[in-house]
Image: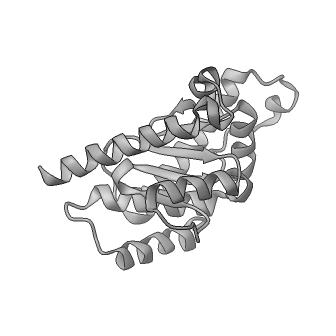
Amino acid sequence: MLRSKRLIRLRLFVCLSILFVCSPQNGFSEESFSESWQSLETKYTAIHYHTVSDLYKFDRMIAYSPGQWGFPSLFKRSDPKDRLEKIGRKVDTLFEKVQKILDMRKRFQKVNINVCADKKELDAAYLQLNKQPCQIRAWYAYELNTIYINIKDVHEEILAHEMAHAIIDHYLLVRPPAAAAEILARYVHKHLYD
């Protein structure tokens, strides 16, 4: 009961914080708030991004391919819907690889991936949630089931590391100590290409 009340308060705080940051007096209009975040749903994740170009940059930064590249794709003009599906397959393939490395295969709620446009936006999100300056490149927030990344400083190893935290925290009945979870996440990072 106490944990659910904390979670409700945390969600309310995040929503109110977003409304405050995106209010008209802070340089954003009501219209820009509704258009601020777009989403791409995959089998295991929900990727949240601001613009399609941000999503495409995220795609270029994550060099992990599900093996869909071939000779015919060289000359075929890419349909935006096909490109979104390709991005979704790439992220899901990476997620499945992390599950395989950890040997933790279980269905659970989709993990959110918030793709911040730059370090400044990432730092602001961290400050809002943790009430202290950000000293890390990316993180996973268990209470929100959300990975936060900066598209200017991300690659497949960072994303796999944060996915490992999400999988570990939801696979086990009792969340492991932070140090143990970090060791497992680093194990994923080390064995991603085995």
Determine which quarter of the picture holds residue 152: bottom right
* Front residue of 136 and 74: 136
Vertical arrangement, residue 76 with respect to residue 113, above or below = above
Q: What color scheme is it?
A: one colour
Residue 122 in percent (x, y) is at 61, 55
The residue that appears at 45% across and 35% down in the rendered structure is 43
* Front residue of 145 and 35: 35
106 relative position to 174: left or right: right
Residue 78 in percent (x, y) is at 78, 25
Vertical arrangement, residue 43 with respect to residue 118, above or below = above
The residue that appears at 45% across and 49% down in the rendered structure is 146
Vertical arrangement, residue 189 with respect to residue 9, above or below = below
Vertical arrangement, residue 79 with respect to residue 28, above or below = above
Residue 101 in percent (x, y) is at 45, 64
Outermost residue toward the front in this view: 25
| Residue 44 visible, this angle | no
Determine which quarter of the picture holds residue 44: top left
23 relative position to 150: left or right: left
